[in-house]
Amino acid sequence: MQNATLKQLAEALASKAASSEELAQDYLTRINALNPDLNAFITIDADKSLNEARAADARRAQGQAGLLTGVPLAHKDIFVAEGWRSTCGSKILSNFVSPYDATVVARCKTAGLVNLGKLNCDEFAMGSSNENSAYGVVKNPWDRLAVPGGSSGGSAAAVAARMVPAATGTDTGGSIRQPASFCGITGIKPTYGIVSRYGMVAYASSFDQGGPMAQTAEDCALLLNVMAGFDELDSTSLERAPEDYTRELDTPLAGLRIGLPKEYFAEGLDGEVAAAVLAAVEEYKKLGATVVDVSLPRTRMAIPTYYILAPAEASSNLSRFDGVRYGHRAAEYTDLNDMYEKSRSEGFGEEVKRRILTGAYVLSHGYYDAYYLKAQKVRRLIAEDFQRAFEVCDVIMGPAAPTAAFDLGSRASDPLQMYLEDVYTLSPNLAGLPAMSVPAGFTRTGRPIGLQVVGNYFSEAKMLGLAHQYQQVTNWHQQAPVL
């Protein structure tokens, strides 16, 4: 069952070819074998997981099972889970055990999905390589010398290594799509507000969005059906009628208009990545799609805009981690201010400190108007670029990242070079648009390449459908690393 998809596992459970407890035990055995090397999991609790599996088997025996009851998954450690250590990849929360479930975790639990553990991530989701975790770097299962991408690198690596069939991730500036691309799996960031942020520890509140990561588009659609929906506990949650994200999986692609932005195929794009993406577009043409040229002229502004706005929000959000109520507190201090300073200095890593300081700077007197307000205006202009493009196309395609996975440590000393990895993924987050990465090939050295698909607001079902159709005529998503 190692290479089985969510759908196949659900069918095996329904036919009684396997029990949930058996599946959970098989995956836990694989996790225990592979995690010491890959470091994809921060927290594993076999007793908790097996108890959830036994409860799922009991529900199935009583005829109360849903489609995914008993199927295993794991959660990015940005989502808090009742009774589980929830660290956000940070030393400052190293001993924090959550007293409640994030809405995403609660919905997965209600659907009967079995939690196999909490997945490693860049500290507070700040990073593009999963080298910023206080619990060590995650290795790419395709090549242990490569990064898995970030910040959902643990989620991507775990799915690629078949340690779990699916995982939750979060995407603030590309943190689902870029690691999905680097690890050869499928991942989707929905329209902002589709998935509740309650209990998803905030990095940048107007950007953060949870989403599913799995082998196939069909699996992502099944998991998004569980994760999505209005939540009155989240003030940014969109009150919309529930929808079935699997409804367009079998829709033919005749007449689909694909927009190719010239800015996505300019200087800086690796040749092998460009070739794989254009080959994928050719497959779509065979399926009946047409291609139109579009322009997103403010793409070059996405990186400076994001790295003004996101740190500004982070500097505010992370002020709550001060050693007073929960989390790390310095052992020695003289007064309250000294406790704040020492606790935060000891608890936060270098990248988090860098972004907090950047955010505090752009929000300070004399710089708020010069930087923050101007960046908000540019954010609106970037969103308008997409709307103009969608007047002539249905979806936009291009690379998920300018390169395949880069070597561990190769960019750790150059933050700007690291930030440039997000050049294609940032704009959809600035606009709040749905976007996904679909496996589309490999480099000559065997590192995966992802195709990014960007849709208009609330077009997740269409995007998942066209990704599914592509996966019916290609087998990139079926490839797994030899471990």
Image (cartoon, rainbow, N blue to C red):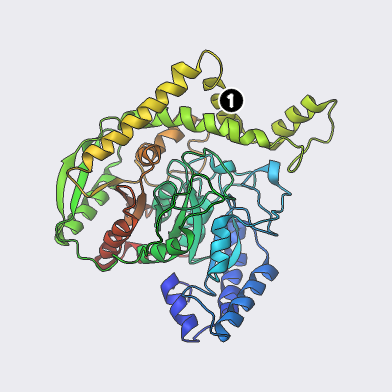
Q: State the image quarter where residue 116 is shown.
A: bottom right
Rendering coords of residue 240 (x, y %): 40, 54
The residue at 40%/22% (across/down) is 374
Q: State the image quarter where residue 76 is shown.
A: bottom right
Residue 117 in sight: yes
Rendering coords of residue 421 (x, y %): 40, 38
- Relative placement, left or right, of 384 versus 359 is left
Q: Sort mark 1 into few (<14), some (14-19) or many (20+) by Cα contacts within 10 Å.
A: some
Q: Nearer the viewer, residue 240 or 109?
A: 240
Residue at the extreme top: 366
The amino acid on which the numbered mark 1 sits, given as a three-letter code, is Leu
Rendering coords of residue 342 (x, y %): 75, 30
Q: Nearer the viewer, residue 324 or 481?
A: 324
- In the rendered view, would you say 252 is above or below 354? below
Label 1 residue SS: helix
Residue 161 in sight: no
Q: Which residue is mark 1?
A: 357
Marker count (numbered): 1
The residue at 57%/42% (across/down) is 202
Rendering coords of residue 221 (x, y %): 39, 63
Q: Nearer the viewer, residue 64 or 479?
A: 64
- In the rendered view, would you say 398 is above or below 103? above
Q: State the image quarter where residue 264 is shown.
A: top left
- Relative placement, left or right, of 299 versus 211 is left
- Relative placement, left or right, of 455 versus 155 is left
